[in-house]
Every structure is written in C-alpha cells, then in structure tokens.
Image (cartoon, grey):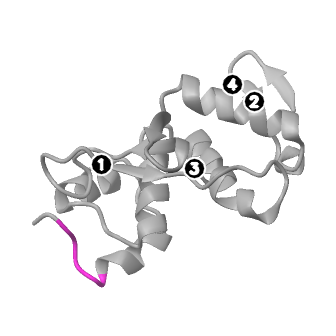
Amino acid sequence: MRYDPDELWVIEPEDYAAEAYAETALVVLLAAEVLSPVNGRDAGLCLMVRCNDTFAWGTADVERVPPIGFGDDLDEPFWDLWRRWKEDPTWGPVQWVALRRQQCPMRQVVEKMRLVGAWPAELEALLEGGEDGE
C-alpha cells in the first residue's frame, strides 16, 4: 500500500491478503458511501451496496456484500467491488451488483453506461436474458 495525494490510498493486488489493507479499503468504501451499514434483524450489521432505481424504477434496493474474512478466498467479491469502484466510482458498483445478481439493469441505465463507456463486455451476456424494467 502506498499513499498518493491524487488517489489517496493505493492498495495493490498483492496487498489484498493483509488485514490492515482490507480495513483501509473498507473504510475508504464506507467514506465514499459505496457501502452502507445496515442493521439486519438476524445477521447483525451488514454492509450493502445501494442500487436504488437501477434494476427497477421507484425501488429502494441494496445488494449485500459478503462478510470479509481478511485474507481468505471468500474476500474476492469485496476486492472485485474495490477494483471496479477504483476504475469507475460511478458505475463500478453497478457493474458489481449486476454481475453478482446475474441481472441486467434497466434499459435506461444500460444506455447511460454505454454512453460513458462503462458497459464492459462481461455484462453483454446479461442482455441475452433481456433487460429489466422496460
């Protein structure tokens, strides 16, 4: 991990297994409001990615982030979210949720993402199932 005044904390892939770096990434995603803590009834505190009005109009929607084990293989979804957010703070979390759910966002969202170049090839397969919210 290194500090870059233009990028704040830069966490490299080789740092992912270190607990301190995972904690830093977690704090950064919370501060950037990518993650929202939600008090789940049975699960205690959960971290969620908000995706309101992305898959359907007029919905308050969230996707749960799996628990972070700080170094085990179960952390990959967290680091995938981190990488996507670092690459594109606006659309990276939407890509992450769409791929986790294997669900295509609404047509209007897809059009916006394509317009700004934020629709990666890996999401094209979701279009075969049809776009939601039309």
User: CA–CA distance between discs 4 and 2?
Assistant: 14 Å
Q: Are marks 4 and 1 in contact (CB under 8 Å)?
A: no
Q: Against 3, is 24 above or below?
A: below
Point out the residue furthest to the top here.
Answer: 5
Res 4 → quadrant: top right
In space, the residues marked 4 and 3 are separated at their CA atoms by: 15 Å
Q: Position of residue 113 (x, y in %)?
A: 33, 52
Residue ID at (42%, 39%): 90
Q: CA distance from mark 2 to mark 3?
A: 16 Å
Q: Residue 7 — which label?
A: 4
**At 40% from the left edge and 80% from the top edge, which residue is drawn?**
125
Circles 4 and 3: CB atoms closer than 8 Å: no
Classify residue 133 as left or right of residue 86.
Answer: left
Tell me the SS state at disc 2: helix
Q: Are marks 1 and 2 in contact (CB under 8 Å)?
A: no
How far across and how far down the image is residue 39, in percent? 46, 37
Residue 51 or residue 120, whichever sits in front: 51
- Sequence-first tag of 3 and 1: 1
Q: Quadrant of residue 8?
A: top right
Q: Secondary structure at mark 4?
A: loop
Q: Amino acid at mark 2?
A: Thr
- Looking at this view, is 20 or 116 the one in front? 20
Other-residue count near label 3 (Cα within 10 Å), few / some / many at <14 / 14–19 / ≥20: some
Q: In the image, is residue 125 above or below residue 108?
A: below
Give the label, 4 or 1, closer to the camera.
Answer: 1
Viewer-nearest of labels 3 and 1?
Answer: 1
Q: Which mark is residue 23?
A: none
Disc 1 is placed on an element classified as loop
Q: Is residue 129 magenta?
A: yes
Q: Which residue is mark 2?
A: 24
Magenta region: 128-132
